[in-house]
Image (cartoon, coloured by chain):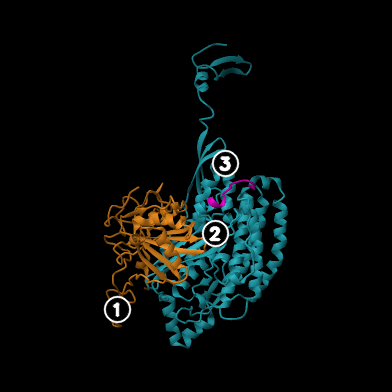
Amino acid sequence: MTQSGYASERETTEGRVFTVTGGDWDTVTGSVDPLSNEKIVVNMGPQHPSTHGVLRLVLELEGETVQEVRPVVGYLHTGIEKNLEYRNWTQGTTFVTRADYLAPLFNEAGYCLAVEKLLGITDDITERANTIRVLFMELNRISSHLVWLATTGMELGAISMMLYGFREREYILDIFEETTGLRMNHAYFRPGGVAQDIPDSAIKKIRDFLVYLPKKLKEYEDMLSGQVIWQERTQGVAILDVTGCLAMGVTGPVLRSAGLAWDLRKTMPYCGYENYEFDVPTATTADVWGRYQVRLAEIRESLKIVEQALDRLRPGPIFISDKKIAWPAQLAVGLDGMGNSLEHVAKIMGQSMESLIHHFKLVTEGFRVPPGQVYVSIEHPRGELGVHAVSDGGTHPYRVHMRDPSFVNLQAIPAMAEGALLADVIAGGASLDPVMGGCDR
Amino acid sequence: MTIEPNESSTGGVPVSADPVGADVNAPAQVPSSPRKGMFGITGTGDVSGFGGLVRRHPEIVGTAKPYGGYFDEVTDALEEAYPGFADAIEKVVVDRGELTLHIKPERVLEVAQIMRDDEALRFELCSSVSGVDYLNSDARRLHVIYHLTSMTYRRRVRLEAAIPAGGSLPSVTSVYPTADWQERETYDMFGVVFTGHPNLTRVLMPDDWEGFPQRKDYPLGGVPVEYKGAEIPPPDQRRVYQ
């Protein structure tokens, strides 16, 4: 063994072996405090399977403990609010439906209710249109909660839950497709009513679904609730109490999981929700487990509302009778989606010049909305969806702002995650159910 | 972070390109005052006569008491709890069943504090903060609008504060922490500066974006996009039905 300035070496049967530990380096490494230097900054996202789309989290970690979280949003900003100002009021529904893509009908409902309030026709919306709106919003709530269950299951390691959740959602999307012509981005609710009546085949599908889903829900509960890993990953994790929720503006299932039964369908009813019987599920644990329980219970309550809505669906007009506002065309679902019905085209092109003029004026120019501003809020699957609409008296919106629950709720991630473990950031973030399309708009 | 110094600042473009939108050579649809005509036609002979129609900008008129509903209770309670009521509240407007309090911008924080804490008011939740740009119809063109919700009494109220471009108003984040991102969005989109905000940076647009996209003099599209040299004309240059 020889001693050189670099590393110690010795001869073996395999050849010469150098040993690089020891020497001067002992003094250097010995003076480093292993604890205080473990702080690392981890960039999670925007491309990451457990961030629900393009959410970016900048995490400062000490060991596995999160010291600081900084959520970064805006990667999916598409300027929906700006675009609305360049289209007429009816065309607006095709834009807002693309904001929160897991709850498109809620975006449309919030927007349409705001336009109707500006027009002062809230009370003129026909009963059938309101019932269809309630029916479809609740189906949409179920599909949104199913996706939450699916993605959260996946993020916490229950991959089979993801497959089941998306499979069940497919049934609801089929119902939507049957009625609106599209699986997502329906533009189905219009200011003044809904674009299309429900075909009997869709009603039969909904009835089948009402029988089908409760059995499946039972299966999911059997699979998840009693499971130790699921309990450990959710119970006592990412706690946010009522005070925290109100301070951060968090509403929806997260607020109800903290114990406050604040549900706009009950507290400030719209679309005739006061006429339906349902409960507002709450939990008191204020953790991910509570949010899981609340959402499952909400799916069951939504099923109750869907059933009642089906029962009170009476034949009648689906659009407001005022011809200055009502969409002139009878729409029909064709092979390529929704469009003008052939009878309507035959009438305006072949029989009635006045109908053609009327059609042309309303479709190209749109209706005028008296100046003013309104704020309408509805209970979205993720919380309060507010629409602040301003009109200057023209045929285009002057300004529309959507207060999206995903955007507001995401502010609460640091409050829930700081001081906890890295794995709990995933659970806590998932329990907020953020959808970046809605958050960034 | 650049804060808009004055009205003549430009909007709209990533760094080192010519200014688009804003106040010089604006390709955007700047709302004219008063609005003329019905079909947005310019440069052709008007044979219909509709081009001579002038649309007036409606003025916001304050409502006289009694306001009806819970609005009287809310304003009375605020007047009782807040000594500066007469000075701070410019106008009370009741329209479409909604109560709007127009407030002097510098008083927003004080009013928010009382709205939240007073027992007869109890607006615990700041539902929404947003902006509206009333270009050419209000000298203080940028309006910041707060929607407060009282869960105790199930009430809503709207606070509205108007500032000129380049102006500022106090942040309400110390009273309502939820206003944090919403004020950032309002800054991002309108260039409204909230003094006392802990971290007033852009939230939806990229950090180095120039201009404030939701302003009325900012065009939609037409901003050069870094994508294989493609440039999309603003919608108002494609076709328009006004």
User: What subunit carries mark 3?
Assistant: A
Residue type at mark 3 is Ala
Labels 3 and 2 within one chain: yes
Quadrant of the rendered image containing residue A283: bottom right
> Tag 2: Cα neighbours inside 10 Å, few (<14), some, or many (≥20)?
many
In this figure, which residue is indicated by the disc labeled 3?
A420
Q: Which residues are magenta?
A: A234-243
Q: Few, some or many C-alpha atoms within 10 Å of disc 1 (few <14, some 14-19, many ≥20)?
A: some
Residue B205: x and y, percent?
A: 41, 53
* Percent position of residue A164, x then y: 67, 57
**Is A237 part of what is drawn in magenta?**
yes
Q: Could you tell me how many numbered marks the image carries?
A: 3
Residue A146 seen in the figure: yes
Residue type beneath disc 1: Gly
Q: Where is mark 1, residue-wise?
A: B51
The label shown at residue A383 is: 2
